[in-house]
Image (cartoon, grey):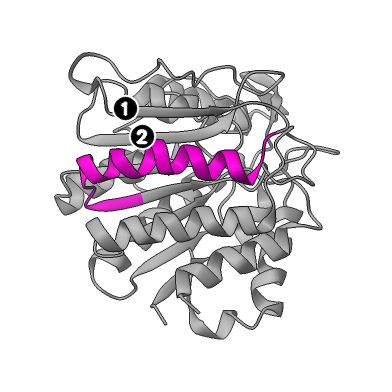
């Protein structure tokens, strides 16, 4: 059994997105219940969050944007940059806790206290661009984590795998000219799928050309197409890139029961994806994987998916 961390902090519940919003606090409780009821909690190293140092958030986000985000939250506004981005007065501080908890988790992996981890954080992050909030996301948690790994711990090559059903436009945008971060995303496209980016020909720019890889999936597809594309696109890319550390943008919203997409992944399909990522991490990154929660909005299904996901990290 691997030494696996679990970032869970009740303060993430303070981020109130408003009534009937899909990105609700109950998501985290469903995940916790699934892990606990599955008998996995006793095998995990529980992690609570600390506030991130502003300097790490500034490695990705513009200072003016950060200041504007703080002012909007503290002024009592209920949305930020878009009507879908529900906020409250605690959202700004909670976003700092999300980043801080992930950076604390990175320290624990790099210090050898744990081998990998699942970070159940709110707000999510992969849609956030350097100066714009999008898709329920305010700070790009995984992008900040990648920079932290490089600047604090000297990691030269970071691999990011994003299997949220919505393309991580923010993460791609941030690293599209950077050859030290490989970004891979498998997601629904086209149809109504937000945000409309992530086409096959989007593969980076300038020095980062070839260090972005997108696998768009047509509506109605499921396990077989995901397996085919990951074997065709992700595995050869990581064989060439050889990441030293793997970050995972973990979205459970491609599940067949999730109403936020038209993709029909089964619970077993999600397990296959994570098992494949772990095999690649074992091969190239000494098993160093941090999984960070993004989407996943079917509350009845989240306990099972989280339990399976954490079980794979533990290697139970």
Q: Which mark is residue 175?
A: 1
Question: Who's the residue at 69% across and 52% down the image?
Answer: 266
- Report x, y in % for residue 62: 36, 23
Based on the picture, tell me whether residue 215 belongs to the magenta stretch: no
Categorize mark 2 by other alpha carbons within 10 Å: few (<14), some (14-19), many (20+): many
In the image, what residue occupies the spot 71% across and 58% down?
A: 302
- Position of 266 compared to 271: left or right? right
Residue at 71 percent across and 65 percent down: it is: 304
Marker disc for residue 93? none
Q: Is residue 223 left or right of residue 176?
A: right
Where in the figure is residue 202, as x and y percent of width and height? 40, 17
* Most foreground residue, 127 or 191: 191
Asked if residue 143 is positioned above or below residue 36 in the image, the reply reads: above
Q: Secondary structure at mark 1?
A: helix
Instruction: Provide residue 138's location: percent of width, then percent of height.
Output: 53, 32
Residue at image mark 2: 183
Q: Residue at x 67, y 23 (%)?
A: 193
**Count of numbered circles in the view:** 2
C-alpha separation, residue under disc 1 versus residue under disc 2: 8 Å
Q: Are marks 1 and 2 in contact (CB under 8 Å)?
A: yes
Q: Is residue 283 left or right of residue 290?
A: left
Residue 196 position in % (x across, y down): 59, 17
């Amino acid at each position: 059994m691997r030494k696996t961390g679990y970032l869970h902090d009740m303060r993430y519940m303070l981020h109130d997105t408003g009534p009937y919003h899909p990105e609700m606090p109950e998501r985290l409780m469903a995940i916790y219940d699934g892990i606990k009821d599955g008998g996995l909690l006793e095998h995990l190293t529980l992690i609570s969050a600390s506030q991130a140092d502003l300097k790490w958030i500034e490695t990705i986000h513009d200072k003016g944007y950060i200041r504007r985000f703080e002012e909007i939250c503290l002024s009592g506004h209920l949305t930020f940059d878009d009507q879908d981005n529900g906020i409250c007065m605690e959202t700004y501080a909670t976003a700092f806790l999300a980043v801080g908890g992930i950076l604390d988790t990175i320290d624990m992996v790099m210090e050898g206290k744990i081998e990998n981890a699942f970070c159940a954080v709110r707000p999510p992050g992969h849609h956030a661009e350097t100066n714009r909030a999008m898709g329920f996301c305010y700070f790009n948690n995984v992008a900040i984590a990648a920079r932290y790994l490089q600047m604090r711990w000297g990691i030269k090559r970071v691999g990011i795998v994003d299997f949220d059903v919505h393309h991580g436009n923010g993460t791609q945008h941030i690293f599209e000219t950077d050859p030290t971060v490989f970004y891979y995303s498998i997601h629904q496209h086209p149809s109504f799928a937000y945000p409309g980016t992530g086409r096959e020909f989007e593969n980076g720019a300038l020095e980062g050309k070839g260090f972005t890889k997108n696998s768009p999936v047509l509506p109605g597809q499921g396990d077989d197409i995901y397996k085919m594309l990951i074997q065709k696109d992700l595995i050869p890319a990581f064989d060439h890139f050889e990441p030293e550390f793997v970050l995972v943008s973990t979205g459970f919203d491609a599940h067949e029961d999730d109403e936020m997409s038209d993709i029909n992944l089964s619970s077993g399909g999600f397990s296959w994806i994570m098992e494949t990522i772990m095999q690649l991490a074992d091969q190239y990154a000494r098993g160093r994987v941090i999984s960070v929660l993004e989407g996943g909005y079917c509350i009845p299904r989240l306990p099972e998916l989280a339990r399976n996901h954490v079980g794979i990290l533990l290697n139970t």
